[in-house]
Image (cartoon, helix red, strand yellow):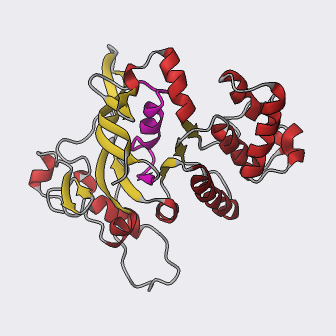
């Protein structure tokens, strides 16, 4: 049985918002009571529509945003949310993020070499000559030639920038990467290269990934297990093949039916989701998906379904799954 590397318990992230004439304080429930485990060595895909809270969940793990109340984020059995500044810095050596927009996450005044080396300096790693060799080794690992060392971000393509971001994340030898939509801003051909790179690096450095994406095809290719998120809640978790072959939650079914298939008979009717994701400021009562669900009944608008086991490592939050 694989070791549990990361465990989330009742994770909640709310953002304050004011509305109305008198500025009544309300809260945007971006992440609203999530229990989740990530096993060492696996790739856990996290999918859902834009605005469902995926990125906020990833940021909360490394405390780029702060969780609320009784939330717990256990990393190797220790609660990250209880860390002081020094402990948090040590934790971030083990857990790094790769962001969606590589250009926005790079300092335009730093060269590629300086960008990667900066991480080593901040975390007090090695002398200058050793840092130089480390930078060159990392650039080679992510497929960047040595002559890119003195180039600036604006001189690079989108795929090259993302390789720099990945190299920077690997600079302090982490064991866990949170990949937040890391290929969504790239061209299709480059996207495939970066996904293959993630797979190669996982095997080479024995990494564990939380891979956040809205692209079901990408998630199927790279993930060991998949968790489906909707409006701040996890609605289904299963092994990748199980989830794609026998999805139980109607939201998961709709996401899968939205994947284009050039071989499909054009007369086959797809189940299309109606409307947009409701506002997390005023989430629906009961099951949050029920206003858009083709299976919804009266019970769904009153009672929130718990996440229950429906098969081997298959969990779903639906009254009628």
Name the quadrant containing residue 165.
top right
Numbered range of the magenta stretch: 42-66
User: Residue 108 or 197: which is nearer the viewer?
Assistant: 197
For image coordinates 28% across by 56% down, the residue present is 292
Residue 28 at x, y = what percent? 35, 30
For image coordinates 40% across by 26% down, the residue present is 80
For image coordinates 39% across by 44% down, the residue present is 52
For image coordinates 90% across by 46% down, the residue present is 147
Asked if residue 132 can be seen in this view, the reply is: yes
In the picture, the quarter occupied by the C terminus is bottom left
Above-or-below relation of 125 to 57? above
Residue 149 at x, y = what percent? 85, 40
Asked if residue 65 lies in the magenta stretch, the reply is: yes
How many dots with numbers?
0
In the picture, the quarter occupied by the N terminus is bottom left
Residue 51 at x, y = what percent? 43, 43
Above-or-below relation of 131 to 252? above
Name the quadrant containing residue 53.
top left
Residue 247 at x, y = what percent? 30, 66
User: Residue 305 or 309: which is nearer the viewer?
Assistant: 309
Left or right of 86: which side holds 27? Answer: left
User: Residue 26 or 263: which is nearer the viewer?
Assistant: 263
Left or right of 283: which side holds 120? Answer: right
Above-or-below relation of 25 to 170? above
Asked if residue 111 can be seen in this view, the reply is: no
Left or right of 86: which side holds 237? Answer: left
């Amino acid at each position: 049985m694989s070791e549990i590397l990361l465990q989330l318990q009742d994770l909640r992230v709310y953002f304050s918002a004011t509305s109305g004439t008198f500025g009544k304080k309300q809260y945007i429930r971006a992440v609203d009571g999530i229990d989740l485990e990530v096993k060492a060595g696996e790739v856990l895909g996290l999918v859902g529509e834009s605005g469902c809270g995926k990125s906020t969940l990833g940021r909360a793990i490394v405390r780029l945003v702060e969780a609320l109340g009784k939330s717990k984020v256990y990393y190797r059995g220790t609660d990250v949310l209880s860390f002081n500044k020094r402990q948090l810095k040590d934790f971030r050596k083990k857990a790094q993020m790769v962001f969606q927009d590589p250009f926005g996450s790079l300092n335009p005044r730093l060269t590629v070499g300086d960008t990667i080396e900066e991480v080593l300096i901040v975390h007090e790693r090695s002398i200058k000559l050793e840092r130089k060799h480390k930078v060159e080794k990392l650039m080679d690992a992510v497929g960047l030639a040595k002559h890119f060392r003195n180039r600036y971000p604006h001189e690079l393509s989108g795929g090259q920038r993302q390789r720099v971001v990945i190299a920077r994340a690997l600079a302090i030898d982490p064991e866990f990467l949170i990949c937040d939509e890391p290929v969504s801003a790239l061209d299709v051909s480059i996207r495939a290269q970066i996904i293959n790179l993630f797979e190669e690096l996982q095997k080479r450095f024995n990494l564990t990934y939380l891979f956040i994406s809205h692209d079901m095809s990408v998630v199927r290719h790279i993930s060991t297990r998949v968790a489906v998120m909707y409006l701040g809640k996890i609605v289904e978790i299963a092994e990748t093949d199980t989830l794609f072959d026998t999805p139980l939650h109607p939201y998961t079914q709709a996401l899968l039916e939205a994947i284009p298939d050039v071989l499909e008979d054009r007369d086959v009717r797809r189940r299309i989701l109606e409307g947009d994701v409701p506002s997390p400021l005023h989430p629906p009562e009961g099951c949050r998906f029920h206003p858009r669900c083709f299976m919804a009944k009266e019970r769904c608008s009153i009672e929130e379904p718990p996440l229950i086991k429906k098969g081997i490592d298959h969990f779903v939050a639906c009254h009628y799954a």
